[in-house]
Amino acid sequence: MKQTKTTSIRLPLDLEKRMLSTIVSDGYGLRGKSKWMQEAISDFLKIPNFEEYVDIASEMTGLSKTISLRINLDLWESLEESVEVVRKKNPLLDAARSNLIRASIFQKLLRKV
């Protein structure tokens, strides 16, 4: 079994509902939430200039739902490197990791449509 790190983020309620609905309709089931989210992060980090999309997540309001996810260590390292890229572009951005994960979820849902 791969080692993982656990983190929590806050999402707007409507985004969380849409995400859970998509996870189920994609065949992951509710137990597959972390796997779906890891795929979202991995896919997002492959987008050229992904750091430009993180600003969208920083402007989200109504972050009323807290969710936890497990991230395998390889992806965690990539995520941490990406957080540094985001912070270099926008040093005043708070919660860069959470915003990056939120942007990943948002982009995966957008690209599904």
Image: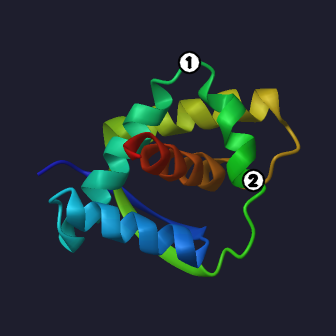
Seen from this angle, which residue lies furthest right?
92
Seen from this angle, which residue lies furthest top?
48
Q: Who's the residue at 18% across and 48% down the image?
A: 2
Q: Who's the residue at 49% across and 46% down the image?
A: 110
Query: Is residue 11 at least partly visible in the picture?
Result: yes
User: What colouring does the structure picture have?
Assistant: rainbow
Which amino acid type corresponds to the residue marked 1 in the rendered image?
Pro
| As drawn, 43 above or below 15 | above
Quadrant housing residue 49? top right
| As drawn, 35 above or below 8 | above
Q: Callout 1: helix, strand or loop?
A: loop
Residue 106 percent coordinates (x, y): 53, 51
Residue 92 percent coordinates (x, y): 88, 44
Which comes before the other along the chain, label 2 or label 1?
Answer: 1
- Which numbered circle lies on residue 94? none
Residue 90 percent coordinates (x, y): 83, 35
Which amino acid type corresponds to the residue marked 2 in the rendered image?
Ser
Local packing at callout 2 (Cα closer than 10 Å; few below 14, some 14-19, many 20+) is: some
Disc 1 marks which residue? Answer: 48
Side of 96 relative to 108 (left or right): right
Side of 112 relative to 103 (left or right): left
Query: Is residue 72 at least partly visible in the picture?
Result: no
Q: Callout 2: helix, strand or loop?
A: helix
User: How far apart are the two marked residues, 2 and 1, measured between alpha carbons?
Assistant: 19 Å
| As drawn, 99 above or below 83 | below
Side of 51 relative to 71 (left or right): right
Disc 2 marks which residue? Answer: 58
Seen from this angle, which residue lies furthest front?
113
Local packing at callout 1 (Cα closer than 10 Å; few below 14, some 14-19, many 20+) is: few
Between 79 and 13, the residue placed more toward the observer is 13
Q: Who's the residue at 79% across and 53% down the image?
A: 94
Q: Who's the residue at 15% across and 59% down the image?
A: 27
